[in-house]
Amino acid sequence: MSHRLYSLILAMAAAILLASSVPAVAQKDPPEPKTIADSINYIWHGIEHDFTALAEAMPEDKWSFKPTQGEFKDVRTFGEQVKHVACGNEAWAKKILGEKPPARCDLGGANPAKSKAEILAYLKESFQAIDKVIAETSDKNLMQGTPGPYWGANRLSSLTATVWHISDHYGQLVIYLRMNGIVPPASK
């Protein structure tokens, strides 16, 4: 047997031995979605959980934090970002339901929440509003028009915009946490 072949066999045996010594980690597949709402909720509930945990992880005395090093001119504070997401969720929920959405979520909207507890309560209410809209989503109303401000000409595109929006801000707030020495809960 050539030295090269012998080395190859040894390397393969070592790889097999190593692979068999590591316990297999079985990932549980999510249940097969049975409805359109199930399909949307698979992603939505994950980001809802992660965003809430991220918001709760920032100490209240850091909710006024906003980066100043680098290109961060005119950015929102951590608390303003969370409130903006809550307002966006409320806006898309109301838009989809044919109700008048809050004005100027880019400026914080009309909700008077200011403290961490108040903004988290507003965030929770906004998630409940989107949860309700998702639960009422079916093949019969998926393409229902959603006129008005905020992205989305129909229910599907409005819900897609909602998921995109919260994901965008989640990514921004991960940086805020890390700049304050906090590892986001979803990264632990």
Image (cartoon, rainbow, N blue to C red):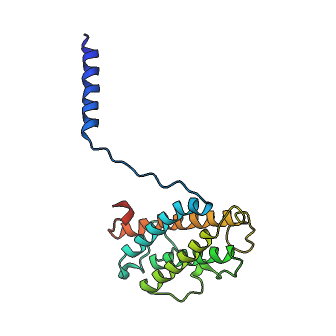
Q: Nearer the viewer, residue 19 or 116?
A: 19
The location of residue 124, given as percent across then percent down, is: 49, 78
Query: In this picture, is 151 found above or below 101?
Result: above
Q: Quadrant of the C terminus?
A: bottom left
Can residue 81 be seen by looking at this rendering? yes
Q: Which residue corresponds to the image point at 33% horizontal and 47% vertical from the top-left? A: 25
Q: Is residue 176 left or right of residue 155?
A: left
Q: Residue, x 58% and y 57% (percent of image)?
A: 34
Q: How many marks?
A: 0
Identity of the residue furthest to the front in this view: 34
Figure check: 186 above or below 9 = below
Residue at x 59% of width, y 87% of height: 110
Q: Which residue in the rendered view is the most extreme toward the top?
A: 1
Identify whether 187 is placed above or below 96.
Answer: above
Give residue 112's position: percent from left, percent from top: 53, 89
Q: Which quarter shows the N terminus?
A: top left
Residue at 50 percent across and 66 percent down: it is 45
Tell me the quarter of the picture where residue 101 sits: bottom right
Residue 138 x/y as whole percent: 67, 64
Q: Is residue 114 left or right of residue 104?
A: left
In the image, taking residue 61 as reference, residue 85 lies left or right, namely right
Residue 131 image position (x, y, % from top left): 56, 72
Q: Is residue 184 visible?
A: no
